[in-house]
Amino acid sequence: MLTLSDLIGRTIFEHNVDRNNDDRMTFLFTDGYLLDMWHEQDCCESVTIEDIEGDLNDLVGRPLTVCEEVSNTDPDASESATWTFYRFATDKGYVTVRWYGSSNGYYSESVTTSVSFNDEILEKGCEYLRKKLSDGLPEAESTRSRLKI
């Protein structure tokens, strides 16, 4: 199973943030991988995206140079709480996603992250790269040569 650090060097071509129901964030990579981030809500707890610092579009079309998770407890919480920061960077910019989880101490305050491969995402990623190459954008070249498209 891949971890966040395995995504360094991979190129995001699409992202989505859904705050309508349970907060969920996804990143699609040109080589067919999907990073999915969410929390399945239970009673007596809440985990949400509190803030996104930076421009997510700075992550698109460039290889990731940073992809990491850092968390810590909130000492000022009335019962129990955890801050979780996800840091992403490319040569174009940095993005920090701040999640906040609180509970009565018996329930999870963590974010679930899943990295998986999907053939449909690979197909879309190849289409994205073909378009970028036809537009003459050099940042697509390294991924194109790796995928042999």
Image (cartoon, helix red, strand yellow):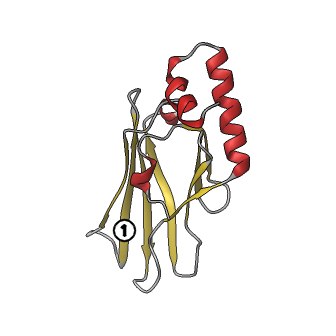
Q: Residue at x 59, y 52 (%)?
A: 34
Is residue 78 shown above or below 74?
Answer: below
Q: Amino acid at mark 1?
A: Thr
Is residue 135 shown above or below 24?
Answer: above
- Across and down, in percent, residue 6 comes to 43, 52
Camera-side residue of 117 and 112: 117
Whether residue 87 appears in this view of the structure is yes
Looking at this rendering, what residue extends furthest in the bottom direction? 106
Q: What residue is shown with label 1?
A: 82
Looking at this rendering, what residue extends furthest in the left direction? 75
- Across and down, in percent, residue 23 comes to 59, 58
Is residue 141 shown above or below 136?
Answer: below
Q: Quadrant of residue 28?
A: top right
Find numbered disc 1 in the image and state the secondary structure of the residue it sits on.
strand
Mark 1 Cα within 10 Å, few/some/many (few <14, many 20+)? many
- Across and down, in percent, residue 144 comes to 57, 29
Q: Residue at x 59, y 50 (%)?
A: 33
- Across and down, in percent, residue 122 comes to 67, 44
